[in-house]
Amino acid sequence: MKLLTIVANILGLAGAALAASRTTPPAGAKVVAPSGGQYTTLQAAIDSISTSSTATTTIFIQPGTYNGQVTIPKLSGKLIIYGYTADDQSHAANRVTLQNTLSAAQAGSNDLSATLRALTNNFALYNVNVVNGFGRGSQALAISANGEYQGYYGCRFVGYQDTVYVNRPHHVFKNCYIEGATDFIFGNNGNVWFENNDLAINGAGYITASGRNAADAYWYVINNSRVFAKPGVSLAAGATVLGRPWRPYARVVFQNTNLSNVVNGVGWSAWGDQPTANVYYGEYGNTGAGASGTRVSWARKLSSAVSINTILPNYTSWVDMAYWNNQGGSTPTPSPPTQPPTQPPPSTPPPSGCSQAKWAQCGGSGYTGCTTCVSGTTCTVSNEWYSQCL
């Protein structure tokens, strides 16, 4: 009996943290690759989607850095984007980066400066790094999350001021990395739950800037996360605070989160002469050097943690619960093509003596390039039009 109990406990622990690799495209996915793929940019793959179609679209991005702004318009169907990764539960394993350098002053608005503008509902992004490299001097968004029912899983968002803009209800960020200095999590109309995130401070400033402007249902809750100075950046102790109220009814809670000494003991800050009477800034169960100190008089020490059901009722109906429970993200399985995947011979002979690097294309319908993979890898069929060296 004791042996059975031990085995059961081991199996239970294994199931609770079952990361998954995602190194090949799901069946039926549109594939983006730096060269030789169906699409060479994410924007081209998105532009190929009919905005009137109610079908779910899946996009898989091969490893690489993709430069330029990406805009996802409002679609009728669900959109899922996967980045190549050997461990979907860890942002550190990401191999795909979307990168742009554009400020709000240059673009004309905060939203228009974002490296990724997600304007559609029912959207999920997995294991993609999103970077706005503008730096100091202006708002410059990495992500503008401007649709409802959006989930961000194992992603990295890097900026300096206004990195993450969430301006619609119903969002989750799970296992993500968010970097910035000034108001780098902000928005007006967001119900957002941040679960198990790394918040890296790269300059003195403020983490959140809630723009809640009335006594409505909107919250930001940062749960079970970590706040620390970005490694390699020299910051004095107390260089940041948890937030400042962009609008009079700002509402933010940090709970069950480790706050390093980069967080100032006052905890929160006013925004100039903005009134704080209706501001709701709360903490519960935080740890670390930054969790101690004399907080501003208008902040709250909560008697219990806020429940995700309070912030996002019925969240299990749209959040990827397999991923949420650390069991690896779910992958849609559309009907396979009527013909099995094949690797037809190229229409012209491939170059002699060639070899394709790991992850490069090596075959597929219409492909005319090299079909030999570098030593240690094999040309593997992903679908009828794309094979890669793995």
Image (spheres, rainbow, N blue to C red):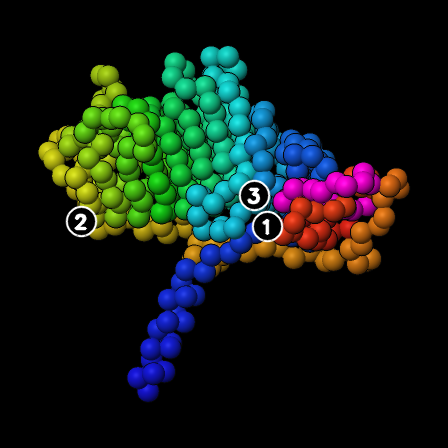
Give the mark nearer the N terminus: 3 vs 1.
1
Dot 3 or dot 2, earlier in sequence: 3
The kind of residue tagged 3 is Gly
Q: Tell me the CA gap for discs 3 and 2.
A: 40 Å
The kind of residue tagged 2 is Ser
Q: Are marks 3 and 1 in contact (CB under 8 Å)?
A: no
Locate residue 1, reporting x and y percent. 33, 87
- Mark linked to residue 303: 2
Mark drawn on residue 375: none
Residue under the image location 53 percent in, 24 percent down = 100
- Badge 2 local density, few (<14 within 10 Å), some, or many (20+)? few
Local SS, label 1: loop
List the residue tagged with mark 1.
23
Please name the residue that numbered disc 3 is placed on: 83
Please tell me which of labels 2 and 1 falls first in the chain: 1
**Residue at screen point 49% across, 50% down:** 88
Q: Main secondary structure of the magenta part?
A: loop
| In front: label 2 or label 1 | 1
Image: magenta residue range: 350-365
